[in-house]
Image: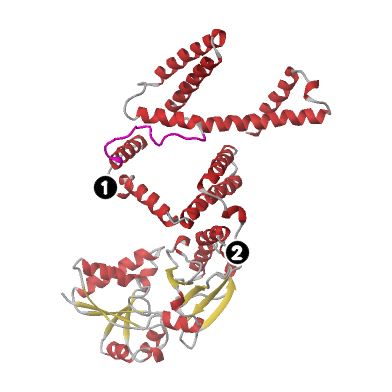
Amino acid sequence: MHQLTIIGLGAAELDQLQMGVYKKLKTVEKIYVRTIDHPVIQDLQKEGMAFISFDAVYEKYDTFQPVYEEIAEQLISAVSKEPIMYAVPGHPLVAEQTVQLLIEAERQGKVQLNIEGGQSFLDPIFGALKIDPIEGFQLLDGTSFSIHDVNMRGHVLIAQVYDSFSASEVKLTLMEKYRDDYPVTVVTAAGSSLESLTTVPLYELDQAVEINNLTTIYVPPVENDLDALRDWTTFRRIIATLRGPNGCPWDQKQTHESLKKYLLEEAHEFLAAIDEEDDFGMVEELGDVLLQVFLHAQIGEDNGYFNLEEVLESISEKMIRRHPHVFGDVNVEDADEVVANWDAIKKKEKGEQKESLLKGEYRPTSALQTSYNYQKKAASVGFDWPNAEGAWEKFLEEWKEFKDEVEKGAPQSRLDEFGDVLFTLVNIARFYKISPEEAMSHANEKFLRRFQYVEQKVLESGKTFADFTLQQLDEFWNEAKTLEKKEN
């Protein structure tokens, strides 16, 4: 098997090329290059050296990945006939996808590589920007990076930005987190005589300067939390500050117990925003729910029992473990099979049942939810009606018993029988996959809206409730219902 030698051309012109690399290049008659568009190659061409470039491959595809894959395939084919040299910009192991594909091919035994040196573009960029990489930096691929990868509090370098189109893609991605006018620096031909640095507001990134294959985008670290309001670490710092020594007295004194009612309230307000199809409301209410999660995690950390990382680890590990059809090799046909697998995995995790099946299902803040949880757990071991018809029959039976107690029973027996009626209604809701808690919240919100409309009409009349008959008040109620239907 012949050897494929990969050598780096450095980041600048021939004057900056390492002498050892220059000597090796001069000993080879035929050199393959990813692109001819590099200052060193242009200088070496003047010295009479010949190069075989893959620039034509770029014209065949709309995206870069198939370009890199074809270049790697052609090189593997060429080296099967004779030893060859492949020269790439910078250092072969820095931001060079074709080399990574060749390394993978070597692991598979398809090619034998010899990777030589070459100065990467990073050193001259650090010099041009006058930054110390020990402060923390990221090198990202402009053709494929996600905003979720970006650390806003470190130096960010984005390579593989070749033209205004790719710069536009980078700009739009960055604007998902950074403010529109955040300063970014376009670094071109760092370390060469053509070196240029231009700082522009982010929204002008693809318009202000010429961009070519020697361009790197630099995004400086954010210096204050107001510049990073879309970053998770900012919110965590805010919560830690509120709970800290110089924070807010109210936040400082909160406990898991004192916050329980707020978590319930915020969850219901989010559900209301969903019912109203209010996207902006959902954003605000989800933020309030998230606040509760972060507060509880911070309290756990302050007390030394757990922290946010443990919360994330727990739920992430659970999601991976309980979705083997996504993260493993299990096949499922539909959502029902997913639920069955979930329950089976959950049962296996908990092992042999030694305590009551209903332990842990009680909810002190909601009797409806407790009832739903109890019935669902009992159903999981077969203690359930085979279909909804049985639940309906049980409801009619309990309803009759309640009516009998209303007519001739005592207050305590009426209470008991009415509880049975509600219990059977919860069971019916379960058969139809309705959350009784959500349904009750929805009914309460609906009553609130409509009764407030009735109040408004009474107020507009200049009279009091006592001045209206029930029939007249009911007409206002029906008006509210009609208006809601028109709005929907």
Q: Is residue 94 visible?
A: yes
Q: Main secondary structure of the magenta part?
A: loop
Q: Position of residue 237 (x, y in %)?
A: 53, 61
| Placement of the N terminus among the 4 image quadrants | bottom left
Q: Is residue 60 above or below residue 124?
A: above
Decide: few, some or many residues near mark 2? Use Cα within 10 Å; few <14, some 14-19, many ≥20.
few
Say which of 73 and 463 sits in front. 463
Dot 1 falls on a residue whose secondary structure is loop
Q: Is residue 179 visible?
A: no
Q: Which residue is mark 2?
A: 226
Quarter location, residue 200: bottom right
Quarter location, residue 442: top right
Residue that appears at 36% across and 28% down: 378
Left or right: 117, with 225 as reference point: left
Tell me the kind of residue under disc 2: Leu
Say which of 86 and 195 sits in front. 195
Q: Which residues are magenta?
A: 350-365
Residue that appears at 42% across and 34% down: 361
Q: Which residue is mark 1?
A: 329
Q: Is residue 370 above or below residue 192?
A: above
Decide: few, some or many residues near mark 1? Use Cα within 10 Å; few <14, some 14-19, many ≥20.
few
Magenta region includes residue 263: no
Dot 2 falls on a residue whose secondary structure is helix
Say which of 182 and 341 sits in front. 341
Q: Residue furthest top?
A: 408
Dot 2 or dot 1, earlier in sequence = 2
